[in-house]
Amino acid sequence: MGLEEYKGVAVFAQQVDGKLSSIALELLGKGKDLAKDLDTKEVTAVLIGSGVKGLADELAEYGADRVILVDDPELKEYRTEPYAHALASVINEYKPEIMLVGATAIGRDLGPRVSARIHTGLTADCTQLDIGDFPLEPVEGKETKHKQLLMTRPAFGGNTIATIACPNHRPQMATVRPGVMQKADPVKGAKAEIVEYNPGFKPDNKYVEIQEIVKEVSGVADIMDAKILVSGGRGVGSPENFKLLEDLADAIGGTVSCSRAVVDAGWKPKDMQVGQTGKTVRPQVYFAIGISGAIQHVAGMEESDIIVAINKDEDAPIFDVADYGVVGDLNKILPDLTEKIRAARAAKAN
């Protein structure tokens, strides 16, 4: 089978309990950009589940030109085998040139299994996707291939960045970290072609049987949705000192987050971690308090609109990415800042 038979960009439209995951909409936005660079207009969303046809309109509003719907009772909850069978079957039937999957818990389980079944490569946990030439620099005696998907991801613990291509197999497949791509502006009332496709499911001993689903109840706000984040690092000094950050967040209408060092120390839960091994965030304002600015942390917050750094070390790398920096003792700075913000808001209210 020739590579030229594969056309267009496809996105796995992850849904859980009949609700689209944010990553599905982010990938549609990026898919539109990639399709434009490939001189093709078609972006396909692959929607897998049971009773999920009603989500097609939302996918259309966020950029899907076509929705391939695999709807079957066997797909009500995510299970590896039936979902892998469904997505691999869609790829073999419709042959997209590019296949994007979110690097969520589901996507990280699904992506490698599907890529193995369809005999293509997979670049995991990408933070950037582009269309370009490969090799990146011409190599004597080696053919330069054009309009390849260039998949960029951190490597070696975030100490270097690797750009990977899959020039000899199709589809070019990647899992993409949530939060790094931006959703397109929705077009209300937009419609997509809906193609109902079902490869068929036969119960077998590979299918896990789900006995019970117990949902975790978390009192921690999702930091990926926050407009303002007040993030603390090892330099905060102690878990008790996070009360200063909580007071600032309360005054400014923000949410508290943290660095990996704080999670490793047991001060805060993993759900609050920003960075390469945590969550990627894009708030309007990001306060980096007592955070040195290691590349692993910066990778998760550098796309914030405004970055404010507070650190007693004037040489801390965080100041290289900050829009505003304050050198000093956070124990003195934060109470004063919080008090002034509260006073300003009270005056505005009156």
Image: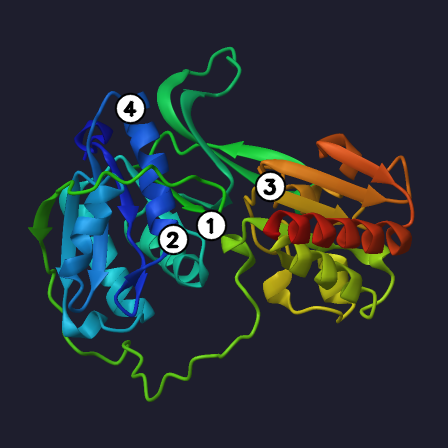
How many marks overall? 4
Q: Which residue lies at the image location 49% right of the left edge and 54% below the top edge?
A: 225
Please state which of the two labelled residues, at mark 3 or mark 4, is closer to the viewer.
Answer: 4
What residue does disc 1 label?
A: 178
Inter-mark Cα distance, 2 to 1: 8 Å
Depth order, front residue of 60/253: 253
Q: Do the residues labelled 1 and 3 touch (CB within 8 Å)?
A: no
User: Which amino acid type is shown beneath numbered disc 3?
Assistant: Pro
Pointer 3 or 4: first along the chain: 4
Give the label on residue 36, or none: 4
Label annotation for residue 22: 2
In which quadrant is the N terminus drawn? top left
Give the residue at x 31% y 79%. Answer: 208
- Say the numbered circle drawn on residue 154: 3
State the image coordinates of residue 274 (x, y, percent, origin top left): 63, 53
Q: In this view, does 180 lie above or below 52?
A: above
Kindly check if marks 1 and 4 are in contact, taking CB atoms under 8 A apart as contact: no
Count residues near mark 1 (Cα–Cα under 10 Å), then give few for <14, some for 14-19, many for 20+.
Answer: many
The answer to which of 149 and 214 lies nearer the viewer is: 214
Question: Label 3 to label 4, Cα distance in Å?
Answer: 26 Å
Residue 200 percent coordinates (x, y): 11, 66
The answer to whether the residue labelled 4 contacts the one labelled 2, judged by CB atoms less than 8 Å apart, is no
Viewer-nearest of labels 1 and 3? 1
Report, in whole angstroms, how far the alpha carbon at label 1 lies from the one at label 4: 22 Å
Circle 2: is it few (<14), some (14-19), or many (20+) Cα within 10 Å? Answer: some
**Residue 330 place in picture, x, y as percent:** 86, 52
Q: Label 1 amino acid?
A: Pro
Q: What kind of element bears circle 2?
A: helix
Give the number of the mark in front: 3 or 2. 2
* Mark 3 or mark 2: whose residue is earlier in sequence: 2
Would residue 143 appear left or right of 323 to someone viewing this image? left
